[in-house]
Amino acid sequence: MAHRTRLWENPVQNSVIQYNLTLFASKLPKYFLAMIASFVCLLGFSSPSYAQVEIDITEGNVQAIPIAISAFEGKTFEDQRFAQEVVQVIQADLAGSGLFEPLDPLSFIEKNASVLSVPKFSDWRVIKAQAVVVGKVERLPDRRIKAQYRLWDVFSGKQLSGEQFFIENENWRRVGHVIADTIYKRLTGETGYFDTRVAFIDETGGKKRRIKRLAVMDQDGHNLRYLTQGRHLVLTPRFGPRANELTFMSYESGVPRVYLLNLETGQKRVVGDFPNMTFAPRFSPDGRKIIMSLQQGANANIFTLDIGTKQSVRLTNSASIDTAPSYSPDGKNIVFESDRGGSKQLFVMNSNGSNAKRISFGDGRYSTPVWSPRGDLIAFTKQVPGRFLIGVMKPDGSGERILTEGYHNEGPTWAPNGRVLMFFRESPGAKGGARIYSVDLTGYNERRVRTPSWGSDPAWSPRVNK
Amino acid sequence: MKLGLIISMVFHSTLLAFALLSLTTAKALKPIEVKSIPMEIVDISELTKLKAGVKKAPAKKETKKKDKKPIAKEIQEKKKKKKPAPKRAVQPVAEKQEPVPIKKPEAQKKKVEPVKKKVAKKPKPKPKKKAKPKPKPKAKIVKKKRKKKKFNEDKIAALLNKVPDSGPTSSKLPDLPGAKKVKGNPRGKHLKMSINEIDAFRRRVSRCWNPPVGGLGAEELSVKLRIKLNKDGTLKGQPRVLNRGSSSFHRAAADSAARAVWQCQPYNLPGAKYDTWQDMILNFNPRDMLRG
């Protein structure tokens, strides 16, 4: 993204507030006296007023916000067609979140809403829209796109947000994702997750001869790119904090090893020089270290490896399989799975490996814990007889909640806003295979993520442009 | 066998006869009628806070009397106005029985009309003047009627006084010279929305409120909104957010609360209590939603 400005925010209100504040500060004593005088006057002359009614509204109605995304303007016919595609991207993103209900453009009364004028709110109220988006897309001669949009509140007639973007032609879909992100954030308060990517294992061929390739795509399934050719088995890709690096496990050298791949340069290298199998890698929040498991005999222990200095530090030393480590977003704690108590359970320890405490106490076996980017929850896979569940719990182990269940669900990964999860679900039978799904924290909005064929082990990237 | 049969038949027939006689005379078991009692939960402040009225008016005692008198009068009316007044009931009985003749209805009709007018203006002095030309018994009846009418009005006033919602009476009562004054303070304006009214309003707003529940905690989503309403229940101007919050969650929550208030208007609120609801504070907090 080349350029992003916020020219469109209404500056009037802010300037008024500022003005008042400075006035008040500079002439404090005078205004203080005036305030007291007016207060005395009020006391003397006003008749006893009514006690102001105060009503608590403690319950609402959770439903998708009806939003109208008006056709974006375009100078030429081609621009208009292109603008229409951008609108479709925004609509699909917002609808996919489950929190918005984009209204059918055929129902719009005001057909040619311009980005330069105030919409006719009465027309939008008739079709029960709560917010309306107007915009304009223009192709510039320097192979860039200029996009503008405004988000209006239909009831108050207030502009909620308005921005202008410049972006390279080939990344045109990102215009839609970025606008959808801003709308999402303005109306829900949460950071959007549409301008993100997903790394996953693309699976093709029969169940016994499955070819597994490392692939990356936009979160909506577009712009797919293969990173490996499928000659070797690859597993558990994980994004770095800047979304430009991937770490994953591959059988490329015969022995399973953790690799590091730079997505911009395509450079790939083995992480660390360990004698045995290394697996379940993940970046530390600052991106300087990789935390992973190292096989030692029948056991596995957790190590960190500093990418710069290549120094490794052992964090656990137990006669059990400790694996799937994941840092808390502040980097102070690590959650991991271990069978040290007999069955696989979740444990949390300090980042130096001390003070490990078990946090999962429910029935069944817990695995693949992932700390939410928000820090408030840990997602996990739970295995109970005959079923695999995806759930979340607080870092202290309380408040366990199951979001979805199925024949074989596994490997949750968080959206950067910590509100949505992706996971893969395998269907039974010889013709069965894995598919990637997303589910939000309510557990109600479950959707299949578009992949070209079977797909597993999804890893959600952080926001590309923070 | 035969003897036994005969004995049995005799015995059964007597038993049946007894049953027929005794059971038919037995009192039917009637279910006790349970009358529903209309009830409203009244806040103690209705009694303790200043109501609109006149300071000197002996409000409480009068209202008690008013409550009793009208009931007595209703009974009298049912007895075809046999008694002149509840306290002197015994004496006039004889007088009343006499003036039954056919002329009376006409006289009554004539008198009834002026009474209405008089009552509205000056209840006591006028009726006496009009009563003079007519025969004595009629005059007495007129007096009784006047009193009754007067009492009826009192009854209405008393009823109104019982109802805490009778706000507008505050401005009307002092203007009527004949009307009884309600105990209170001329500046007292205490009126309150009933619990039912508040609840109905709350339900309506809740239905339109779509809070962004994904916030980190309910605290960030709590919004204190001040709204002003027109008499027709529509919003007067923009709702104002009273509590500040820096996070995007608070901003989204504040917008959602304002949208709810805009969306649900107009509100059906009691016009008599406009002063109480023209300016309200709404505390939006989705805590009850997050519990489950």
Image (cartoon, rainbow, N blue to C red):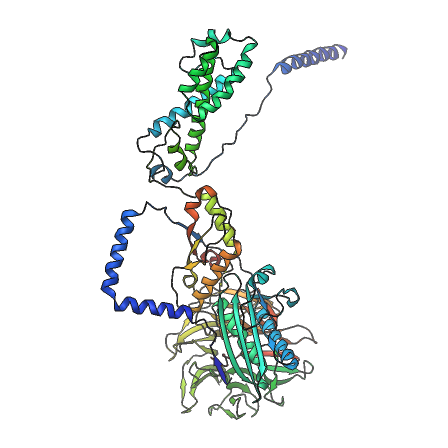
- In this rendered view, identify the residue nearer to me: B70 or A276: B70
Question: In the rendered image, which quarter is residue A443 located in?
Answer: bottom right
Question: How far across and how far down the image is residue A100, in percent?
Answer: 57, 66
Question: How far across and how far down the image is residue A391, in percent?
Answer: 52, 68
On the rendered structure, is A24 left or right of A449? Answer: left
What count of labels does the image hold? Answer: 0
On the rendered structure, is B279 left or right of A29? Answer: right
Residue sitting at the far right: B2
Which residue: 43% across, 89% down? A307
Question: How far across and how far down the image is residue B219, in percent?
Answer: 41, 62
Question: In the rendered image, which quarter is residue A113 located in?
Answer: bottom right
Which residue: 41% across, 81% down? A317
Confirm whether residue A34 shows in the render: yes
- In this rendered view, identify the residue nearer to me: A422 or B198: B198
Q: In this view, does A145 lie above or below B69?
A: below
Question: In the rendered image, which quarter is residue B48 located in?
Answer: top left
Q: Is residue B118 above or below residue A94?
A: above
Q: In which quarter of the image is the N terminus of chain B?
A: top right
Confirm whether residue A380 shows in the render: no
On the rendered structure, is B6 left or right of A187? Answer: right
- In this rendered view, identify the residue nearer to me: B243 or B158: B158
Question: How far across and how far down the image is residue B171, in percent?
Answer: 39, 37
